Image: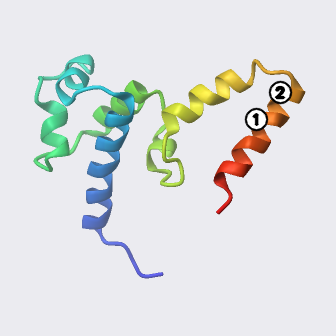
Amino acid sequence: MGSVDYMDYTEWFYQRLTALRMEKGVSARDMSLSLGQSESYINKIENRRTMPSMAGFFYICEYFNITPQEFFDSELRAPQKGKELQRELGKLTPQQAEHILQVVKDLTQK
């Protein structure tokens, strides 16, 4: 596996932010305003004109209801949906949970 340079990480960051925002189904403007920023804040980040501060990044994670680790975990394609699914699974009986687990395993087998 080759080394990954700074530009690869920054490009990935921009793409991840956009994907998470789209998963949430919110516009860049609405997300910016929800974060207490100017209406163009997220647009400027997604268009590679700026990067958020560390505090700004933490607010972005909080907005998505994910941890910074989940933000950077490329294996989690839909972390927001995963958390929602986990909450709902906690309400199931053990038998129901086992059934859902088998369905998920069937879906994820390649």
Q: Position of residue 86 (x, y in %)?
A: 66, 29
Instruction: List the residue tagged with mark 1.
Output: 100
Q: Which one is in front, 51 or 47?
A: 47
Task: State whether residue 109 is above or below residue 29.
Answer: below
Instruction: List the residue tagged with mark 2.
Output: 96
Please say if the residues under marks 1 and 2 sit with CB atoms less than 8 Å apart. Answer: yes
Residue plotted at (76% across, 35% down): 100
Element at badge 2?
helix
Task: State whether residue 55 is above or below residue 16.
Answer: above
Report which quarter residue 82 is drawn in.
top right
Residue plotted at (12% across, 23% down): 39
Q: Which one is in front, 99 or 50?
A: 99
Please state which amino acid type lies under the numbered disc 1: Ile
Quadrant of the frame with the C terminus: bottom right
Report which quarter residue 56 is drawn in.
top left
Please state which amino acid type lies under the numbered disc 2: Gln
Element at badge 1?
helix
Q: Looking at this view, name the residue that lies furthest to the right.
A: 95
Q: Which one is in front, 46 or 52?
A: 46
Q: Position of residue 35 (x, y in %)?
A: 26, 21
Q: Position of residue 64 (x, y in %)?
A: 41, 29
